[in-house]
Image (cartoon, grey):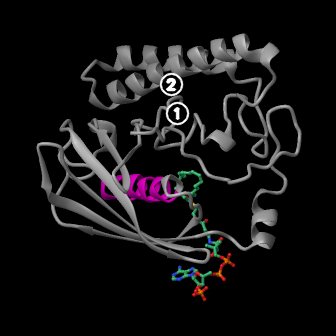
Amino acid sequence: MTENDGDAAPLAELMTATTELGAALRELIEVSVITTADAGEVAAAADLVRAATARIGDARRPVSQLPRLDDPSEGRRVFNPVTGIANPMAPPLVVRADGDGVVAEATLGLAYEGPPSFVHGGMSALFMDQMLGSAAGAAGLWGMTAHLELDYRGPLPLQTPLVLRARVESHEGRKAHISGTIALASAPEKILVEARGLFVMPRPEKQAAYFGAITDASGRHAPPRRPGDATALRPA
Ligand SMILES: CCCCCCCC/C=C\CCCCCCCC(=O)SCCNC(=O)CCNC(=O)[C@H](O)C(C)(C)COP(=O)(O)OP(=O)(O)OC[C@H]1O[C@@H](n2cnc3c(N)ncnc32)[C@H](O)[C@@H]1OP(=O)(O)O
């Protein structure tokens, strides 16, 4: 945690509650796109959700301030939109080191739909971007996405276990070439999505311009040593 030991218990409580809220919202998102309830029920649900928003909506951090629950030096970013346990937009992917790269499994619901019954291609790009970045992190590198390209060889079915992989192919200086794949967990050799990316560590002036104003939750200027977010990166 980013705060001193005296705050450990309240922070643990906050982590539990925030994770709970993320999980509840994730269920709500899925149900909101799959429900066949009638208009009255849907409208009543919208009122309940607005009441929940009002309950916590007054206390907000500025965009330049990291959440109390984050510790970028340990790679913990709880609201990352792909791996963040507390972000309902995130499945979340639990990325772990595997061999010379990283791997994650995911089963995606209807909130991720593009073509009927299949995953939206933009979602695949989002997940690959994160996986490639995580592969950089796992290899002790970091950088921002400079170039990302994908080949969609076959559609990804919803509600079906998927396996996502990424590994660093080569790196020199501030550049890392990274590749990734998505396949069905039941047919991991048949690659359905292929990604290739170039991640570049910004030159120091750019790092200062991008991240120099970031503070930790107490307002201290403690920009992360590596401004990454391997929220769910775990050892094998
Ligand atoms: C992030 C990993 C962290 C790991 C840390 C620990 C563990 C973490 C694990 C997991 C992390 C999670 C991962 C997150 C995943 C998501 C990441 C994102 O969403 S990042 C947001 C979107 N990306 C941007 O907003 C960048 C916008 N672009 C820029 O700011 C600049 O273009 C930047 C910083 C990328 C490069 O700028 P310059 O000034 O520092 O570098 P110049 O000199 O332009 O380029 C350096 C070299 O790269 C080549 N290059 C640059 N861009 C290129 C491009 N698009 N295509 C080809 N080559 C390019 C150049 O030709 C040059 O090559 P030559 O040294 O001459 O050989």
CA–CA distance in space, label 1 to label 2: 5 Å
The residue sitting at 77% across, 34% down in the picture is 61
Q: For residue 122, what is the image quadrant?
A: bottom left
Q: For numbered disc 1, what is the local secondary structure?
A: loop
Q: For numbered disc 2, what is the local secondary structure?
A: helix
Residue type at mark 2 is: Gly
Residue 102, image x and y in percent?
38, 50
Q: Magenta region's main secondary structure?
A: helix
Horizontal side of residue 43 vs 73, given as left or right: left
Residue 45, image x and y in percent?
44, 16
Residue wearing tag 2: 22
Residue 30 vs residue 192, the one in the foreground: 192
Residue 131, image x and y in percent?
42, 53
Q: Earlier in the sequence, mark 1 or mark 2?
A: 2
Q: For residue 79, what is the image quadrant?
A: top right
Can you tell which mark lies on residue 55?
none
Identify the image quadrant of the C terminus. top left
Disc 2 crowd, CA 10 A, few/some/many (<14, 14-19, 20+): many
Identify the image quadrant of the N terminus. top right
The vertical placement of 42 against 161, above or below, is above
The residue sitting at 60% across, 77% down in the picture is 173
- Which region shows up in magenta? 120-136
Would you say the residues marked 1 and 2 are in contact, meaning their CB atoms lie under 8 Å apart? yes
128 drawn magenta: yes
Horizontal side of residue 24 vs 219, given as left or right: left
Residue type at mark 1 is: Asn
Residue 193, image x and y in percent?
24, 61
Residue wearing tag 1: 87
The vertical placement of 120 against 55, above or below, is below
The vertical placement of 43 against 213, above or below, is above
